[in-house]
Image (tube, rainbow, N blue to C red):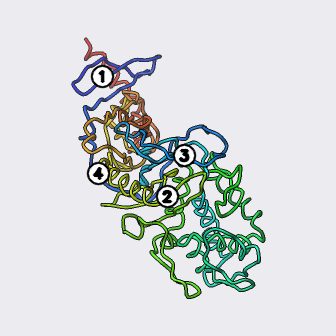
Amino acid sequence: MTPPVTPAVRAAGTYRTKDAMHTRRFLLAGATSLLVSSTALAAPAARRRHPAAGPAAVDAAAPVVASSPANSLIGPIDTIARWACIVDYTTGAVILEKAADERMPPSSLTKMMTAYIVFSMLRAGRLTLEQMLPVSEKAWRMQGSKMFVPLNGTVAVADLIQGMVIQSGNDACIVLAEGVAGSEDQFVSLMNTQAAQLGMTNTHFLNVTGWPMDGHYMSARDVATIAMHLIHDYPEYYHFFSEKSFRYNKIAQENRNALVVKGVADGLKTGHTDAGGFGLCASAERGGNRVVMAINGLPSSNARANEGERLFEWSFVNFENATLLHNGAVVDHAPVWLGQAPSVPLVATRDVTLTLPHGWQNRVHVSMDYRSPVPAPVTAGQQLGELVIANTGLAEIRIPLVAGADVPRLGLMGRATAVLGRKLGHG
């Protein structure tokens, strides 16, 4: 028997017919009735991606960029960064972006992927922190920032990691690459494979240090991506990025990330080349909310630190994370046609946490689409519809709604009685 659909209009919503599918859409004036708490989860979320834009790399020295607008969830925001991407770690929401998918010279921000590969080898047991790795002449002769490894000597992996992420030692990177993969080129192959697996579509590595080379590039969005994965995938090693200084070979060296030294951020990495300007990838947490920032193309180290601190402050002042509902929450009860129960609970299938400008919770539109009434039998876990969240400044979010209980079908006599009773009720 085909379940009847009786047109009805309520203050909360309506029954609608579209292409012979009877859908019930329940509109809320805001998300207040679903809002249960503010929270932070400990995993990066999937985020939207954009096609590559801009040249394969910046060929000439990057000009000093005057303050110009970046896009944000609350409108244009000026920044002197040439490239920028700020992401909420919990939700993956992009809070701010400016030329975020352009391919740029990443300088020592490259070393975050070098660290990611090293951490994966530690996790797999192919390296230990105490293991001593030999120093080749190539590593010893490497120019740029150095931790001053000894020619033909050996260095512990833990010291090399500190030299790489705190002092940004190019020599340390070469020692690690050769120790893991036998050569820098082989290690670079691992880096590019990993970048592809993480969805870093505007990244291509030619070395492990970020030394300027044509065709070596990342985007600001990809820099933020590897940072989020470092935090989430290898939390046991994230402390290396937080250390304010280290001492090796009787030389004390301070972390080049001024925001870490000041306590504004708890990681990750800085970089600088003539072509790319001064860059910073940093993460900070306040009140349970974590933000990851990637900026590049700044005119000086002071400008990098000042702009990074300003944008962190702007992020935390203007945005909050709001949990609209939890996995397993009952969001409505759908009428059941010819079932042994008159209705079935509709249950959310996951937590829904959104990054929103402060005070925007009541501007979120939440609706539910499902067939009404639902024909029996119904099986617990059966998808019956969707919860739709919109008007957040982000792409529309759809969450499957499933049955929270079994509802067996009435027997023959029960079905006949129900149908007869409905006909009599309609006169």
Residue 314 in the image: above or below residue 10 = below
Which amino acid, by three-letter code, is at mark 1?
Thr
Residue 136 in the image: state x and y as whole percent: 76, 78
Q: 372 left or right of 234? A: left
What distance separates the C-alpha of mark 3 from that of mark 2? 20 Å
Q: Nearer the viewer, residue 427 or 404?
A: 404
Where is mark 4, residue-wise? 317
Where is mark 1, residue-wise? 14
Where is mark 3, residue-wise? 63
Residue 68 in the image: state x and y as whole percent: 43, 39
What distance separates the C-alpha of mark 1 from that of mark 3? 58 Å
Would you call the spot at circle 2 few (<14 residues within 10 Å), some (14-19), or many (20 or more)? many
Residue 389 in the image: above or below residue 192 = above
Kindly check if marks 4 and 1 are in contact, taking CB atoms under 8 A apart as contact: no
Which amino acid, by three-letter code, is at mark 3?
Pro
Q: Nearer the viewer, residue 9 or 373?
A: 9
User: Which image quadrant for residue 11?
Assistant: top left
Label 3 vs label 2, nearer the camera: 3
What distance separates the C-alpha of mark 4 from that of mark 1? 39 Å
Which amino acid, by three-letter code, is at mark 4?
Val
Which amino acid, by three-letter code, is at mark 2?
Cys
Q: 424 left or right of 228? A: left
Going from the N terminus, do you reach mark 2 or mark 4 first? 2
Where is mark 2, residue-wise? 281
Going from the N terminus, do you reach mark 1 or mark 2 first? 1
What distance separates the C-alpha of mark 2 from that of mark 4? 20 Å
Label 1 vs label 2, nearer the camera: 2
Q: Nearer the viewer, residue 30 or 148?
A: 148
Residue 56 in the image: state x and y as whole percent: 67, 43
Label 4 vs label 1, nearer the camera: 4
Residue at x-position 43% and y-position 66% = 258
Kindly check if marks 1 and 2 are in contact, taking CB atoms under 8 A apart as contact: no
